[in-house]
Image: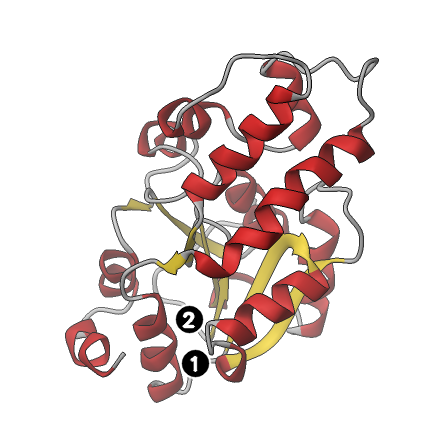
Amino acid sequence: MIPVSRDTKISHIIFDWNGTLVDDIALAVKSVNTVLDEQWLPHIDASMYRQQFGFPVKTFYEGLGIDFNKMSFVRLIEVYLGIFNRGLNACKLHQDAEACFLWAANSAIPTSVLSASQQHTLNANLEHYHLDGFISHCFGLDGTEADGKFDLARRLDTVLGHPGEAALMVGDTDHDIEVARICGWRVATVSHGHQSRERLLQYHGAVFPSLVALFEHHFPGTDMRRFANVA
C-alpha cells in the first residue's frame, strides 16, 4: 500500500457502479434469493446481504449454503443475471450521483467507472442513466466470471498513466478498497451500498453516509447543492 499524502491534488475520480452510484440493493437481494430457490435454501434480507456480500462471489454463495456439486457456478450466474440485468434500469441512482458528475465536469476533473458488471451491460446502463457523456473511461468484465476487478483496475491504472494518490476511487465494498490499494489510489467508500458501514470500518476509516459527504470531505469548499439542484 502506498501512503497517501493529503497534499496531493486529486486529478481523476474513479467510481464503482453497483451500489455506489445506482441503488440496486433490493434487486441484488431479489436475484440472490432466486438463486437460493434453486436449492430450496432460506431467503436473506437486505441487512443479511450487506453483512455477508463480498468477493470472490463464489465464496459468498458458499457461505449462504449453495452446493456447487448440485449447481455449476456458470448456472448460478445465469440465474442471477436473468433477474438482475432485466431489472437494473428500473433502479434509481443514489441521491446526488448525477450531481457528482456535474461537479466534476465543472471542475475539469475527469471521471471513470470501474465495475464488476459485464462491459456491454455497463455501457447500456450508463447510457440509460445519461452518465456516459461524463465518463472518460469505462471498464467492465468481458465475461460472466464475477471474479472481481483487480485485472480491470491494473488496466485502467495503465491507461491513466499510473496516477497513484492523485486518483480517488469511490466505492462501496472492501473489494473496492483492495483494488484501490493495489494501484496506489486514494480510496473512500459510501455506506449506502452493498456492504454495511460496520464492515467497511473494519478496513478503513474513510466511510461516508452519502456521495455528498464524501465529496465535501475530499474537495473542501465544494457546494454540491448547486449541482444537485441542476440535476
Position of 150 compared to 101: left or right? right
Instruction: Identify the residue at image location x=25%, y=47%.
Output: 209
The quarter of the picture where the C terminus appears is bottom left
Quarter assignment of residue 147: top right
Which residue, given by chain and number where applicable, does mark 2 sit on? 10
Q: Is residue 165 above or below residue 137?
A: above
Pinpoint residue 110: horizontal percent, then vertical percent: 49, 80
Quarter assignment of residue 66: top right
Position of 215 compared to 167: left or right? left
Type of amino acid at the residue the image marks with label 2: Ile
**Which label's residue is closer to the chain start, 2 or 1?**
2
**Viewer-side label of 2, 1:** 1
Which residue, given by chain and number where applicable, does mark 1 sit on? 109
Q: Nearer the viewer, residue 42 or 158?
A: 42
The quarter of the picture where the N terminus appears is top right
Spatial CA distance of label 2 from label 1 is: 8 Å
Pinpoint residue 141: horizontal percent, then vertical percent: 73, 55
Position of 137 compared to 87: left or right? right
Q: Is residue 162 above or below residue 206?
A: below
Q: Secondary structure at mark 2?
A: loop
Q: Secondary structure at mark 1?
A: loop
* Label pair 2/1, CB-CB below 8 angstroms: yes
Q: Is residue 127 above or below residue 67?
A: below
Q: Nearer the viewer, residue 208 or 147?
A: 147
Pinpoint residue 46: horizontal percent, then vertical percent: 39, 30
Q: Residues within 10 Å of mark 1 (few under 14, many from 20)?
A: few
Instruction: Identify the residue at image location x=62%, y=33%.
Output: 55
Instruction: Identify the residue at image location x=26%, y=53%.
Output: 210
Pinpoint residue 10: horizontal percent, then vertical percent: 42, 71
**Colour theme:** secondary structure
Q: Residues within 10 Å of mark 2 (few under 14, many from 20)?
A: some
Type of amino acid at the residue the image marks with label 1: Ile
